[in-house]
Amino acid sequence: MATKQIGDVILDVKNISLSFGGVKALTDISFDVREHEVRAIIGPNGAGKSSMLNCVNGVYRPQQGAITFKGQTFSHMDSHQVATMGIGRTFQNLALFKGMSVIDNIMTGRNLRIKSNLFLQALRIGPAQREEEQHREFVEHIIDFLEIQAHRKTPVGQLPYGLQKRVDLGRALAMEPQLLLLDEPMAGMNVEEKQDMSRFVLDVNEEFGTTIVLIEHDMGVVMDISDRVVVLDYGKKIGDGTPEEVRNNEEVISAYLGTGH
């Protein structure tokens, strides 16, 4: 893989702690993400990975700590603010509109970018029509990029799982995020689908210049596509570094890699 320019820190997570009732989901977690890198978060089930993403994109409000994105520091983010600032997200459980076509699903990702009012949009006249055409053009580019042209008009619910995951990625890309959070993008996929999705993740990182944070269980995938890896176990950070460093970390091996790897 050609060496790429990793930039300055774009996201800085400092001392995040999160509890639900008496249960600690995250304890004093700190890590950073640099511009243009692929940053993986790994760990066994229940390690706190999704909870961590939910703190970053405003779904959960941590009791302690702060998150800095592009130089602005927040004790918590709210979801709308996160999206307008340029953080996109895909979800473990697909939150797609199953009855809507591929193109219309991906268009929903453009909502933040639409400037004309709802009345003009409904009538599709004047500036609203021109604006919609521009957004559709952008969405068509994403559809080409993700190689799902043949399914543009297909209701998403009729597509195989691997392609639905691709549509989910397309919808997140339609927001033009600077930082993209991927929650288990390869879960439930066969080997071939995983290879395709790995390629798309790397292409998004390279061609769109998008910084990526991903949660992934498949260690082979993580080691292949990540620049740096942070490891959680029972809500605590037990490792952080390059894939090679993490692979050789004794604590990580016993917590994670020691079981069936």
Image (cartoon, helix red, strand yellow):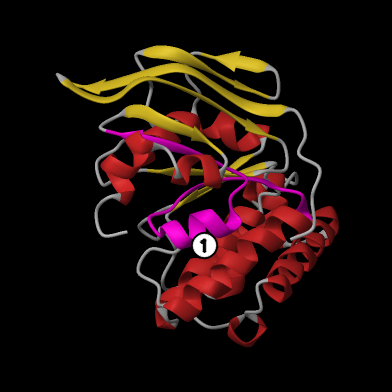
Q: Which residues are magenta?
A: 208-233
Quadrant housing the C terminus? bottom left
Is residue 99 positioned above or below 218 on the image? Answer: below
Front one among 5 and 182 = 5
Does the segment drawn in magenta span residue 220?
Answer: yes
The location of residue 258, given as percent across then percent down, is: 28, 50
Residue 156: in sight, yes or no?
Answer: no
Quick one: quadrant of the N terminus? bottom right
> Residue 180: image x %, image y %?
60, 46
Q: Amino acid at mark 1?
A: Asp
Seen at 46% across and 61% down, the residue is 220
Lateral position of residue 37 relative to residue 88, left or right:
right
Say whether residue 86 is left or right of residue 41.
right
Q: As drawn, is 41 to the left or to the right of 93?
A: right
User: Among all residues in the image, which is located at the extreme left?
Assistant: 22
Residue 237 quadrant: top left
Horizontal and vertical percent for residue 193? 49, 76
For image coordinates 70% across by 18% down, the residue present is: 71
Instruction: Say if the magenta span includes residue 131.
Output: no
- The residue under label 1 is 168
In this picture, residue 148 sits left or right of residue 22: right
